[in-house]
Every structure is written in structure tokens, then in C-alpha cells.
């Protein structure tokens, strides 16, 4: 079961990344061109938020099941356990909060230009955090591409 959760969490990462990238670029283009905010834009923002929340649920399950997360005094002395126990988990929660706050603020905004502006900035910052704190294979944390 643990292996299945790891693969699901790792695979859905690509969906999250694609949705965040599309959401950021679409919001930027529509913001600068002052295009109308459509139902498709709302759905893209919603599915982006939904995907990061699914990742959160999978990540929480992994957090309490994985052998890479260690709750001991020595956990912070070892890079891999520190990364998964504290750094990755905390920063991904920050990114998920940003996507959620951006979605809610954009939904409540009356001005269409403001909706795109909020979506762009919140999702851009979340995307940068996600990219920085994914355990990419080249970082040496024993993670794969999928």
C-alpha cells in the first residue's frame, strides 16, 4: 500500500504542475489583455485547487506511513529525514494554502482584471515553492520521476 501511495503522490505531482503552469500563464495572458473571466477560467482555478488538495491528502497519508519521516531528536541532523519531515511538508502546505487563498480571493473579486491578477500572483508563488521543494531525483533524496 505504501508503494502505491508513493507512486500516486509522485504521479499526481505532474497533474498539479501542469495545472499550475497553465493557470499561471493563462491568468497572465488574460490579465494583460483584460479579457473577460469565463466559466472555463473558474473551472481551471477550481481544478488546480482540487488537485493540490488531493496531493495534500496523499501527502498526509505518506507523512504518517513513510520511513523517510522520522519523529526523533536526530531527524533534523540527517538531510533526507529533515527534508521529508519538515521542509517538504511545511512548504507544500504553504503552497496549497496560497492556491486556496488565491482561488477564494479571485472568486470573491468583483473586477475581472483583479481575478486574473490574484490568480496569477498566488499561483505563481505557489508554483515556485512547489518546484523548489519537490524531491527531484537530482537532489539525492532517493525519489524518482514517477
Image: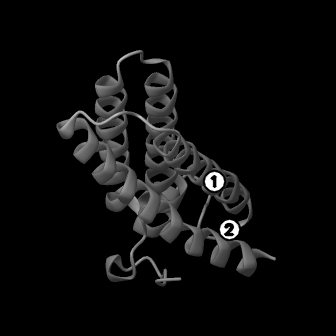
**In what element is the residue under mark 2?**
loop
User: Neighbour class for label 1 at 10 Å: few (<14), some, many (≥20)?
Assistant: few
**Which residue does the image show at 52% across and 50% down from the upper left?**
48
Please state which of residues 104 and 132 is positioned toward the viewer in this rendering: 104
- Rounded to the nearest angstrom, the CA distance separating label 2 from label 1 is 11 Å
Residue found farthest to the right: 1
Residue 7 higher or lower than 73, as above or below:
below
Q: In this rendering, which labeled residue sits more in front, label 2 or label 1?
A: 2
**Residue name at image x 62 percent, y 48 percent:** 50
Between residue 96 and residue 139, name the one nearer to us: 96
Q: Which residue is mark 1?
A: 71
Q: Position of residue 33 (x, y in %)?
A: 19, 39
Nearer to me, 57 or 45: 45
Q: Residue at x 53, y 39 (%)?
A: 39
Name above or below for residue 101 compared with residue 47.
above
Residue placed under numbered mark 2 in the picture: 66
Whether residue 9 sits left or right of residue 18 in the image: it is: right
Left or right: 36, with 145 as reference point? left
Which label sits on residue 1? none
Q: Nearer the viewer, residue 29 or 79?
A: 29
Amino acid at each position: 500500500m505504501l508503494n502505491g501511495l508513493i507512486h500516486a503522490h509522485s504521479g499526481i505531482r505532474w497533474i498539479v504542475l501542469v495545472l499550475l503552469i497553465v493557470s499561471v500563464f493563462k491568468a497572465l495572458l488574460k490579465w494583460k489583455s483584460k479579457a473577460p473571466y469565463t466559466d472555463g477560467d473558474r473551472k481551471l482555478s477550481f481544478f488546480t485547487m482540487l488537485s493540490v488538495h488531493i496531493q495534500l491528502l496523499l501527502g498526509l497519508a505518506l507523512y504518517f506511513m513513510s520511513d523517510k519521516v522520522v519523529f526523533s531528536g536526530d531527524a533534523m541532523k540527517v538531510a533526507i529525514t529533515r527534508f521529508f519531515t519538515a521542509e517538504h511538508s511545511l512548504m507544500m502546505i504553504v503552497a496549497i494554502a496560497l492556491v486556496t487563498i488565491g482561488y477564494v480571493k479571485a472568486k470573491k473579486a468583483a473586477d475581472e482584471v483583479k481575478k486574473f491578477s490574484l490568480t496569477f500572483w498566488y499561483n505563481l508563488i505557489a508554483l515556485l515553492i512547489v518546484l523548489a521543494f519537490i524531491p527531484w531525483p537530482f537532489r539525492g533524496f532517493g525519489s524518482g520521476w514517477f
